[in-house]
Amino acid sequence: MLRNDLFCCVLLGDPAVRLPLRSVLAPPPALPVCTREDERIEVFERAIAQVLSCQVTTERVHSDVCEQGITLDQLRHLIDTYRNAGRTVLRRELDTLARKDHE
């Protein structure tokens, strides 16, 4: 009897195992679509990163991104906003880590 049961499992597969066929047959998730706005933000992120890392001056970066329609004062404001937002998030994350260390 055991031999017959094993034969059926080999022939038909183990009935206790149910593979999720739907996930196997489902198409892979789509990659996020890069929009023109994403590309524009990346241009500014690269420019801001160069200024913050002291690789170039704000004036030099402005000459690279002036075709985006941004004045020098607006670029300086964007740099300050980016820096302050990053510091705010970093401060919050450091506080969270410090609380976890005390628990």
Image: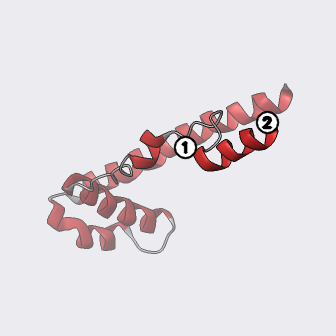
Q: Secondary structure at mark 1?
A: helix
- Crowd band around label 1 with a 10 angstrom C-alpha radius: few (<14), some (14–19), many (20+): few
Circle 2/circle 1 CB separation < 8 Å: no
The residue that label 1 is drawn on is 87
70 horizontally vs 86: left or right: left
Left/right of residue 38 with respect to residue 10 in the rendered view: left
Which coloring applies here?
secondary structure
Residue 103 drawn at (x, y percent): 84, 25
Name the residue at 53% across, 37% down: 88
Q: Residue at x 43, y 68 (%)?
A: 50
10 lies left or right of 72: right
Amino acid, disc 1: Arg
Report the residue that reaches farthest toward the right: 102
**Image disc number at residue 1:** 2
Q: Looking at the image, is mark 2 or mark 1 nearer the viewer?
A: 2
Relative image position of residue 63 (x, y in whole percent): 24, 72
State the image quarter where residue 34 is shown: bottom left
How many residues crowd around disc 2 within 10 Å: few (fewer than 14), some, or many (20 or more)?
Answer: few
